[in-house]
Image (cartoon, rainbow, N blue to C red):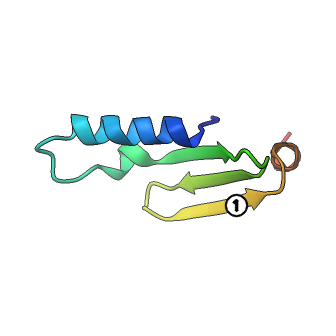
Amino acid sequence: MRINFSKLFLISCLLTACGQGKSSINISEMQGTYLFVYPSGEAEVVIINPDSTYKKDIYRTYDEFQKKLPS
């Protein structure tokens, strides 16, 4: 999944608007893998696990990230 910051901001706003009156977000609503590709070409990957832990990796380029994916 490729998401840029403007889309992430929009999603955040939608989640906030949809969550009116809701005191918290369930982790199952947020878990997953998120990919951010910066204008500089760097790629940042954030993986949010079901137990609320996360892993963040930063690659110099999107191609470098692609090479790390399992075949």
The answer to whether residue 26 is left or right of residue 28 is left
Position in image of residue 68 (x %, y %): 84, 50
Q: Residue at x 87, y 43 (%)?
A: 63
Q: Front-most of 59 and 49?
A: 59
The answer to whether residue 70 is left or right of residue 29 is right
Q: Residue at x 46, y 48 (%)?
A: 31
On screen, residue 4 above or below 25: above
Q: Amino acid at mark 1?
A: Asp
> Mark 1 highlights which residue?
57
Q: Residue at x 21, y 40 (%)?
A: 19
Number of labels in the image equals 1
The answer to whether residue 71 is left or right of residue 6 is right
Quarter of the image for residue 14 reads top left
Residue situated furthest left in the rendering = 21
Position in image of residue 64 (x %, y %): 87, 49
Residue situated furthest front in the rendering = 39
Position in image of residue 52 (x %, y %): 43, 62
Quarter of the image for residue 21 reads top left
Task: Give the structural element (helix, strand or loop) at label 1.
Answer: strand
Q: Residue at x 50, y 56 (%)?
A: 49
Position in image of residue 32 (x %, y %): 52, 45
Query: Quarter of the image containing the N terminus?
Result: top right
Pointer 1: residues within 10 angstroms few (<14), some, or many (20+)? few
Query: Quarter of the image containing the C terminus?
Result: top right
On screen, residue 33 above or below 60: above
